[in-house]
Image: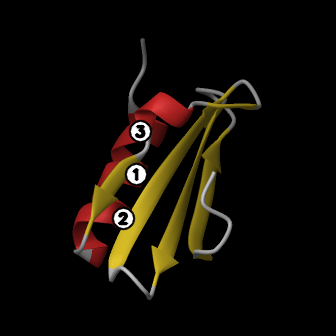
């Protein structure tokens, strides 16, 4: 987990038991969307982008998606 990057958005959905954390890394100029499900961090699902709206949309999509 990239802890050097500052958290800029965090949201959860109790219905899907999912959480999304959006971090911003100033040094690299990128956003990292980190996914959690049932309280477990899913490192293989990290998503990197330079656009805030892309990061925000990806986080929100993860919260709504059901398996």
Query: What mark, if any, has residue 62 been given in the picture?
Result: 3
Residue farthest to the top, as pictured = 67
Identity of the residue drawn at 45% across and 55% down: 33
Q: Classify residue 53 as left or right of residue 28.
A: left
Question: Picture coordinates of residue 57 (x, y %)?
Answer: 29, 58
Query: What mark, if any, has residue 26 been given in the picture?
Result: none
Identity of the residue drawn at 63% across and 48% down: 12
Judge by depth and name the residue closer to the eye, 28 or 16: 28
Q: Classify residue 19 as left or right of residue 57.
A: right
Mark 3: give few (<14), some (14-19) or many (20+) Cα within 10 Å.
Answer: many
Answer whether labels 2 and 1 touch (C-beta < 8 Å): yes
Answer whether labels 3 and 1 touch (C-beta < 8 Å): yes
User: With respect to residue 63, does 37 lie above or below?
Assistant: above
Residue farthest to the bottom, as pictured = 26
The residue singled out by tag 2 in the image is: 56
What is the count of numbered marks?
3
Mark 2: give few (<14), some (14-19) or many (20+) Cα within 10 Å.
Answer: some
User: With respect to residue 13, does 9 lie above or below?
Assistant: below
Quarter of the picture containing the C terminus is top left
Q: Quadrant of residue 36?
A: top right
Q: Quadrant of residue 55?
A: bottom left
Q: Classify residue 9 as left or right of residue 59.
A: right
The residue singled out by tag 1 in the image is: 60
Question: Picture coordinates of residue 34 (x, y %)?
Answer: 52, 49
Identity of the residue drawn at 38% across and 69% down: 31
Q: Quadrant of residue 53?
A: bottom left
Mark 1: give few (<14), some (14-19) or many (20+) Cα within 10 Å.
Answer: some
- SS under mark 1: helix
- SS under mark 2: helix
Q: CA distance from mark 3 to mark 1?
A: 5 Å
């Amino acid at each position: 987990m990239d802890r050097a990057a500052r958290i800029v958005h965090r949201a959860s959905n109790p219905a899907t038991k999912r959480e999304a954390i959006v971090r911003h890394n100033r040094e690299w100029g990128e956003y990292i969307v980190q996914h959690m499900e049932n309280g477990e961090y899913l490192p293989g699902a990290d998503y990197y982008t330079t656009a805030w709206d892309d990061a925000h949309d990806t986080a929100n999509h993860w919260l709504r998606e059901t398996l």
